[in-house]
Amino acid sequence: MMNRNSAFRILLADHNCRTRRELARFLVHRNHDVDCASTGYQATRALRKRDYDLILSDINLPQLSFFDLAAHLETEGLETDVVVIANLLDLDRAVSAMHEGAADFLLRPHDLKKVAYTVERIRELKDRRADDARRLQIRREAQMQEETTLALARAAEERDRMNIGHGRRVASYAVEIGRGLCFTEARLERLAFAGKLHDIGKIGIDDAILNKPGRLNDEEYAVMKRHSEIGEYILKPVSAFRDIAPIIRHHHERFDGAGYPDGLAGDEIPLDARILCLCDFFDAITSKRPYREPASLEQALEIIAEEKGAFFDPLVSEVFIKMHHPRRAVVAI
Ligand SMILES: [Fe+2]
Ligand SMILES: [Fe+2]
């Protein structure tokens, strides 16, 4: 947002030397940045050199009527507000200029209070428009991130048929923990995206290993372990996912340093990755596999309690255990 104390760049185009002098002095005194032009030629030349926030333009400017000025701005793709300056006798033309897009008009002789009020009003309108545009941009970016996440998660699920819904469930558990740790809404949103995409790297793992019905041998497990690095590699070039990429890379690190890919320990592991690590384990162990039955909630919580400080972050484990005694509904993502 524009700093309200910053100078407003104004082009003052008026053929009357006295008007230019008086208005320019008044506006500069109010900390505005003012350039002057006495003809249409000078005004268009100034507009090619600089961007202005506002043009104060004499309706009888030689070589450039308001309508020529409006056409010039449109051709150049400029959205600069124009306030016309007119004599009382030209009131009809000033009103026509308003119909054609002028932001306002000022009548001679100038009431300086009215000039100050008009400039401030235009500045506020411009700030509001900039804020609206920024909000729209943020909404569009959030929507694009959501849609891209969905598309990537679907691509991963198409490859990893045994784990359909795993990403969404991990995201739900992670958001529960994040709420327990008083994360901000923005951080919870990032955690949800990371949860949904944490195994995206499995796209790069060979089908024979990814969908093997039995347990993996050491060699196959070594290949499977590469999915966290591949996930980081896939997401890193996308600016919207750049801060998620390290969480994905480290979601299989263990609190005691015995995890992968970098063997980080304790606080070296991003907190969001420590959260995903526990949620990933919980969902995996409570899900059915061709080679084993799912663990019950109580069994899973018991393992988490035993592994507190070894496999899992102690604080994250405590929050999760507390939240699941008694079992609560998983939050909707
Ligand atoms: Fe994983
Ligand atoms: Fe996983």
Image: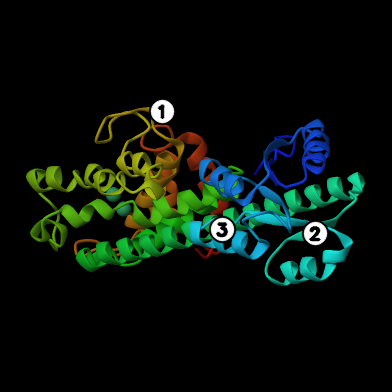
Q: Nearer the viewer, mark 3 or mark 1?
A: 3
Mark 1 is on which residue type?
Gly
Question: What colour-coding does the image apply?
Answer: rainbow
Callout 1: 10 Å neighbours few (<14), some, many (20+)?
A: some
| Image point (47%, 62%), residue name | 143
Residue that extends furthest to the front in the rendered view of this protein = 62
**Horizontal placement of 185 versus 125: left or right?**
left
Mark 2 is on which residue type?
Phe
Q: What distance separates the C-alpha of mark 3 from that of mark 1?
A: 59 Å
Q: Nearer the viewer, mark 1 or mark 2?
A: 2
Residue occupied by mark 3: 73
Q: Is residue 229 above or below residue 258?
A: below
Dot 3 and dot 1 residues touching (CB under 8 Å) = no
Instruction: Say which element carries label 2.
Output: strand
Q: What distance separates the C-alpha of mark 1 from that of mark 2?
A: 66 Å
Dot 3 and dot 2 residues touching (CB under 8 Å) = no
